């Protein structure tokens, strides 16, 4: 799941460097089972959300789960990015996975997703009855879902990830498999950012 909303009410690139608290208590989850394992990224908004659900259980912090590194664009809004780093937008319009200035791109985050999936897969092999809650971030989840659904990475920005909502995957035959309707997350219209 994506963490609960932060205290930042602006539409900015909120990545690894602005480490904000969550705005309010997370909502109660609509699930029919309990979680035994809890993972969180190393950022406050993720940890605070995970601690809310874990109650007294241990939360495992893993830096692989952190948000994309927006580099020099951290804290900017889209207009500021367009004015200062228009070359990035030009590359995106050509379906090139451009890195944020001194930051990451989708492929960098996807490498972290795959590394974390290997860690989780090894953990689940040992005990398949663990329901696991993983609290992470928007771009991490877009990369996970986009790659799982075999979408082109230049379309991953269209994946709509809500705050504080369970995205269900199951572990079966040594694979982590999506257990959701792809139409719920994939926004089909083309956004004209360029």
Image (spheres, rainbow, N blue to C red):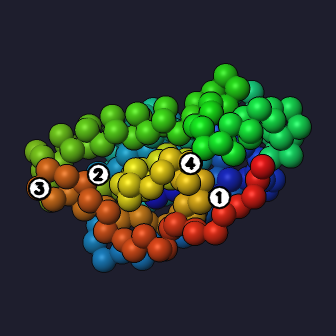
Q: Nearer the viewer, mark 2 or mark 4?
A: 4
Looking at the picture, does residue 129 appear above or below residue 68? Answer: below
Label 4 neighbourhood size at 10 Å, few (<14), some (14-19), many (20+)?
Answer: some
Q: Position of residue 77 (x, y in %)?
A: 81, 45
> Quick one: 84 or 46, which is closer to the camera?
84
Looking at the picture, does residue 157 appear above or below residue 121? Answer: below
Q: Report the residue marked by disc 1.
A: 5
CB within 8 Å, label 3 to label 1 = no
Q: Earlier in the sequence, mark 2 or mark 1?
A: 1
Q: Earlier in the sequence, mark 4 or mark 3?
A: 4
* Residue 74 visible, this orientation: no
What secondary structure is found at the residue carrying circle 3? Answer: loop
Q: Which mark is residue 154?
A: 4
Q: Position of residue 124 (x, y in %)?
A: 18, 48
Q: Nearer the viewer, mark 3 or mark 1?
A: 3
Q: CA distance from mark 2 to mark 1?
A: 22 Å
> Quick one: 23 or 64, which is closer to the camera?
64
Q: Which mark is residue 173?
A: 3
Label 1 neighbourhood size at 10 Å, few (<14), some (14-19), many (20+)?
Answer: many
């Amino acid at each position: 799941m994506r963490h609960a909303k932060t205290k930042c009410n602006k539409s900015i690139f909120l990545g690894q460097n602005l480490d904000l608290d969550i705005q309010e208590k997370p909502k109660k989850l609509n699930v029919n089972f309990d979680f035994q394992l809890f993972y969180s990224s190393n950022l406050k908004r993720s940890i605070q959300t995970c601690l809310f659900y874990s109650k007294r259980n241990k939360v495992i912090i893993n830096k692989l789960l952190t948000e994309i590194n927006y580099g020099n664009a951290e804290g900017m809004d889209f207009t500021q990015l367009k004015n200062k780093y228009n070359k990035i937008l030009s590359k995106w319009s050509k379906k090139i996975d451009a890195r944020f200035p001194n930051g990451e791109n989708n492929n960098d985050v996807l490498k972290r997703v795959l590394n974390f999936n290997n860690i989780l897969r090894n953990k689940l092999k040992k005990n398949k009855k663990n329901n696991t809650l993983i609290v992470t971030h928007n771009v991490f989840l877009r990369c996970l879902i986009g790659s799982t659904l075999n979408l082109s990475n230049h379309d991953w920005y269209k994946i709509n990830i809500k705050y504080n909502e369970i995205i269900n995957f199951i572990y079966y035959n040594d694979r982590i498999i999506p257990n959701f309707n792809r139409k719920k997350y994939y926004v089909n219209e083309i956004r004209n950012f360029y």
